[in-house]
């Protein structure tokens, strides 16, 4: 993140130079400090989530960057609402859906088998290892809602006719374990 500079009201903002075509003057974009902090707080979780759903790292990174760009464009309105995190999550999932790649990861296959809200909660909590509170914060919802979504997902998983869901879940969970082992160097 570029260096921070104080604004007229005493808060700190972040500047990012934008390089236009040759011969035109450089434009500097000033990001509000609260937006920069939001990005720093949520970027890693968003990136890992996108990587679980999109097969290519670059495609996942692009989806996250575009989602945060969408959020930046409506940051004032997002802050005015009561659910800034929910608005950001909607922007992220929208960009992931628009990534134009086939759903070819085990985690992405879950979305064809259960409602998106359940799949989101299961991926964040059970695969990525976020606490119920962190999952609720990421989704922009209440802890009780996440607990309910996870319980409903568990009931679906335990149903006798859920063989496809269980197979998909095993594959998604196994891929996550492999990914975490590679990142941490543990086997």
Image (cartoon, rainbow, N blue to C red):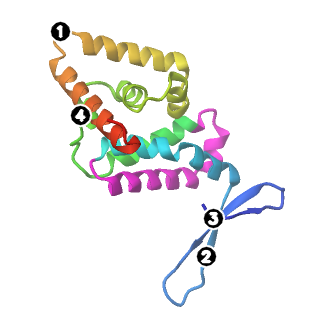
Choose the circle earlier in sequence order: 3 or 4. Answer: 3
Choose the circle earlier in sequence order: 2 or 4. Answer: 2
Q: Secondary structure at mark 1?
A: loop
- In front of the other: label 3 or label 1? 3
Q: Which residue is mark 3?
A: 2
Give the label on residue 27, or none. Answer: 2
Looking at the rendering, the stretch of residues picked out in magenta corresponds to 55-84
Image coords of residue 148 (percent x, y): 44, 14
Q: Marks 4 and 1, how far apart in space?
A: 19 Å
Give the label on residue 160, or none. Answer: 1
Image coords of residue 60 (percent x, y): 36, 51
Is 78 magenta? The answer is: yes
Picture layout, residue 161 above or below residue 122: above
- Seen at 58% across and 50% down, the residue is 74
Picture layout, residue 42 above or below residue 82: below
Q: Marks 3 and 4, how far apart in space?
A: 38 Å
Q: Secondary structure at mark 2?
A: strand
Picture layout, residue 121 above or below residue 21: above
Rate crowding at label 2 as few (under 14), some (14 to 19) or many (20 or more) other CA atoms within 10 Å: few
- Seen at 79% across and 54% down, the residue is 11
Rate crowding at label 1 as few (under 14), some (14 to 19) or many (20 or more) other CA atoms within 10 Å: few
Q: Marks 3 and 1, how far apart in space?
A: 54 Å
Q: Marks 2 and 4, how far apart in space?
A: 42 Å
Q: Secondary structure at mark 4?
A: helix
Give the label on residue 109, or none. Answer: 4
Q: Marks 2 and 1, how far apart in space?
A: 60 Å
Image coords of residue 39 (percent x, y): 57, 49
Is 119 magenta? The answer is: no
């Amino acid at each position: 993140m570029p260096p921070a500079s104080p604004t007229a009201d005493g808060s700190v903002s972040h500047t990012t130079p934008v390089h236009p075509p040759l011969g035109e003057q450089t434009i500097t974009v000033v990001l509000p400090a609260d937006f920069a902090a939001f990005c720093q707080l949520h970027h890693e979780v968003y990136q890992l989530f996108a990587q679980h759903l999109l097969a290519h790292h670059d495609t996942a990174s692009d989806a996250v960057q575009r989602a945060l760009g969408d959020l930046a464009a409506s940051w004032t309105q997002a802050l005015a609402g009561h659910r800034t995190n929910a608005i950001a999550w909607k922007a992220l999932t929208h960009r992931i859906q628009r990534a134009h790649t086939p759903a070819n990861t085990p985690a992405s296959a879950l979305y064809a088998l259960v409602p998106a809200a359940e799949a989101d909660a299961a991926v964040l909590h059970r695969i990525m290892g976020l606490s119920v509170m962190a999952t609720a914060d990421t989704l922009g919802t209440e802890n009780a809602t996440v607990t309910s979504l996870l319980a409903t997902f568990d009931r679906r998983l335990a149903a006798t006719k859920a063989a496809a869901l269980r197979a998909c879940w095993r594959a998604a969970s196994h891929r996550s374990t492999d990914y975490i082992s590679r990142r941490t160097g543990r086997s």
